[in-house]
Image (tube, grey):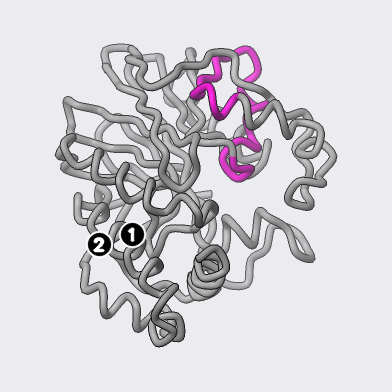
Amino acid sequence: MNVLRPAAGVYAFYDGRVEGYRFAEGPNWVDDGALSLGIASYAVVSGDAALVYDTHVSVDHGRRIRAALESEGVRSFTVVLSHWHLDHVAGTSAFAGCDVIACERTAQLLAGSRDAIQDGSLEGPPAIDPLVLPSTTFREHLELQIGDVQLELLHTDIHSDDATVIWWPEHELLFCGDTMEDTVTYVDEPERLPVHRENLEKLRPLRPGRILPNHGSPVVIASGGYSAGLIDATQWYIDFLLRSREDASLAELDLREVVTACGNADVHYFAPYEQVHRENVASVRAHG
């Protein structure tokens, strides 16, 4: 796991996109849904306080995040979960005794699937046991003070209906979780794509100067993140998927052709996303 510094006071704990490396033998959600694509968890640090945005793909990853921040003088931790998917919540037990914040929908989804997550039957191995549930929940909006930093947590329905993004107004910085990705968004709720597109539009008035996604290029993240063009690219791709339901020729395009057609400098072709794209197209057409 590499520690990147995309902005002052911001740490990105990045793992994945390492050719030939696997977390475990055989099919598993850590390799197939996270490390193959690359994944980051973030921290915003002010003085001896830190907000940790997602706890990564394992307890060991979470422990390494905590240890790295403690070595920088952090003594007070607040965890915020971007949504309920396993690669974002697996390391939470490394932050025992800390406040864990999530929107009400995330808490509901985690509690409802707790047994299946803990025995490894929800998405297959590895199991997450114990699964730590949120200790604090909010509905649509929550203002949070971390040291001298004022942050805003916003609940939205993009990628999943329990998404929480973090807005740092002072630096025009948006931590977007899985609401946007580079190369393309992963479609988990195909029937809700029009809603996701509409809610992406509602992020635009924030006028983010930079966007930090959980899945993206480590080079771009280390250089400060993506421009607001990532919103445009994600909306374009959703429109493409919706058009592919009626146009079989679009469904046959490979991801490199799709990226070329998009023509957006904020997305970069990365071969492991070919499988994600094929699954997206199949899922959307099946729910047409």
Q: How many neighbours does mark 2 have within 10 angstroms: few (below 14), some (14-19), or many (20 or more)? A: some
Residue at which label 1 appears: 219
Amino acid of disc 2: Asp
Q: Kindly identify the residue that appears in the image at 34 percent across and 38 percent down.
A: 175
Determine which quarter of the picture holds residue 67.
top right
- Position of 12 compared to 272: left or right? left
Q: Name the secondary structure under disc 2.
A: loop
Q: In this view, does 80 lie above or below 49?
A: below
**Chain part drawn in magenta:** 85-107
Amino acid of disc 1: Val
Q: Kindly identify the residue that appears in the image at 26 percent across and 79 percent down.
A: 261
Residue 168 lies in the magenta-colored region? no
Q: Position of residue 71 (x, y in %)?
A: 48, 26
Q: In this view, does 279 lie above or below 181?
A: below
Residue 92 lies in the magenta-colored region? yes
Q: Name the secondary structure under disc 1.
A: helix
